[in-house]
Amino acid sequence: MASSSRTDGRQPLETRAISTKLGALSRADGSARFSFGSTSSLASFAGPIEVRLREELPDRATLEVTHRPLEGVGGQPARFIEHKRDPTPSRALEASLISALTPLLALSQHPRSLVQLVIQSLSSPCTSYHTSSSMADIPDGPVSHLWPPNTILSKADLASPSSPYALSFAERSSALNAASLAILDAGAVSLRAVPLAVSLAYIPADVFVDVLGGIEEGGATREVQLVVDPSAEEERAAKSRFVFGWAFGEGVSTSGRGAEQDEDMEGEGGKEAELVWAVSEGSFSKAEFDTALEQSRVSASEILGAVREQLRRHISARLA
Amino acid sequence: MAATAALPSASTNAEAGPSAPPAPSAAAAAAVFKRLHPASYLARYLAEGYRADGRKVGEWRDVSVNAGSVSTADGSALVRMGDTTMVCGIKAEIAEPSSAAPTHGYIVPNIDLPALASSRFKPGPPGDEAQVYSNCLNDVIVSSQVLNPASLCISAGHAVWALYIDVVCINYDGNAFDAAVLAVMAALRNTRLPKAVYDPNTNKTTCVRGETYPLSLGRTLLACTFGIFQSKTLLPDPSSFETPLLPTTITIALDEEGTACLVRQEGLGGVVGKTGKEVLGDAWGAAEDRCRALREVLKEST
């Protein structure tokens, strides 16, 4: 019986091969490189170090996060029109990471100091947000030279477009994961819980089958297909995109029911987790959102398992 | 150091002796308490079921929308959410399309939080907060297909409209993003562009004065922002006093059919007794009600 599979042969709920490399930067207190297949980020951690006087906080360390994309200057990727002001996706990602990491890092144990994270993206952003070739978009026949056009535009695409400047969702999740591992590699500031992120997308079912070459189980009538860790092509074709960041650790959940919930979870069974970051865009219902949220927790647990295994090997190699 | 303070007691000052300063009035003492220990101040209010500005815990501020007030812009709107005031102006220019997308116009949104709006913002280049809001607004407008860029095409490959959407904060009292989104939606509905004709012989586009047409808009989305205070309470529509005390913010944007366009959570979720997912569920329900009310306001204004 054929089951749904994607162009690269993955199952819909399977992430790409996860690889981590810790301690590659010898001059940083901690560093890590995290990859979902070809989408990867490199993070360096320095701290606690000297803080600038105007940023000094008397009761805790100051957390500073900087993100640099692969192309473009200091967070401003290449543009095709001279805008007065550019949107800066790196600034937004930095703000999200600060919000996610502040409740988890033991900053109050290092007052009047600086904890600095620098994340370098190592993969190209989606450079083209059109699926068809450009000049072919000009329709044949009489071309209109006036506005508003007389012709009624065709219904909007099923896929939700994404801004050409935006960082891909897989890239954003790899950034948080690399930062998390860099903090663990340094070991200088303790983490209450380990944050890990994963990206997901809903792809319209017919696009999944026709365009992406996915194979669907016969008779399945779903409008959208949920995929975990979408590739760049899948993100472009998606109707909605998500990134969820989960923090795994004892006592991180305030619901008081954390331990009970995980009793039936495999793998990292018994690990309490709480949502620490969520970004979603496109067009989706509450039910779709809840399903994606549940699946992201499962996938994040799997990533935690893989990460712990690689950490264990790394540390025992260092001790050997 | 834990920051639990008691209100400076008026009676101890009075007993201090003839050379002691006069007892502070209750209002002055409360203002000092608010300034020195804002978290405790807010916690005291929440324990009674109210917020620092007199609202009930789950209450939103009043909204008013005034469209078309800026006559020099092609479309404009002024939105007041409580004391937060945002002005959105839309200007259209004619530009050459990029070769990657010859039939697509440009939509360039931007949010500005100038120093005049609040002492929080320093003069100079846009601060981090403004950049983050601008980025979020741009992403949500593009991904939600609020306006199809292909509808801005005058002549494929030669001339397209470029819409500059500028939102300026006149007065900041928290929750600039919700007000900005509402202002943009109202301004887009208010926008009228002149008829434009491209002449392939002269490579020039001429506009016909007097004939204006509205934009062909897609989904209309409205945003609702919440904050979580000390992992205990979900507070909708945070004011500027509350915002620094809320380490977690949740933003939910819904369109006219109740389908979501954007759901964001930044910070550790969950409150005492509820997981993060349940809190998001509560927020979603509250957002649905709020969006319905906002849509009424939007309809009346345009």
Image (cartoon, coloured by chain):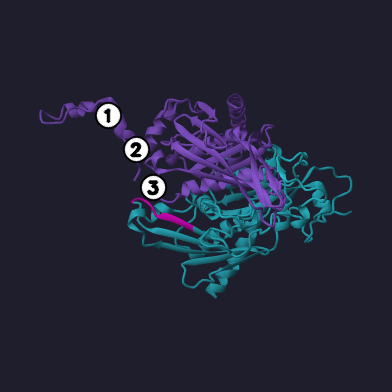
Are callouts 3 and 1 both on one chain? yes
- Three-letter amino acid code at the position of disc 3: Pro
Q: Is residue B8 left or right of residue B291?
A: left
Residue for badge 1: B28
Q: Which residue is mark 3?
A: B123
Q: Which mark is residue A5?
A: none
Please tell me which residue is depicted at 38% across the width and 47% down the height of the picture.
B122
Q: Name the N-terminal-most of marks 3 and 1.
A: 1
Q: Which residue is mark 2?
A: B37
Of mark 3 and mark 2, the one earlier in the sequence is 2
Residue type, numbered disc 1: Ala
> Residue reaching furthest front?
B202
Of the pair A142 and A72, the residue shown nearer to us: A142
Q: Chain ID for label 2?
A: B
Comparing marks 3 and 1, which lies closer to the viewer?
3
Chain B's colour?
purple
* One can see residue A19 in this view: yes
SS at mark 1?
helix
Please report, as a chain letter, where disc 3 is located: B
**Vertical order, B79 against A272 (above or below):** above
Residue at 75% of width from left, 55% of height from top? A131
Sequence-wise, the earlier of marks 2 and 1 is: 1
The kind of residue tagged 2 is His
For numbered disc 2, what is the local secondary structure? loop
- Alpha carbon separation for disc pair 2 and 1: 14 Å
In depth, the one of B186 and A214 nearer the eye is B186
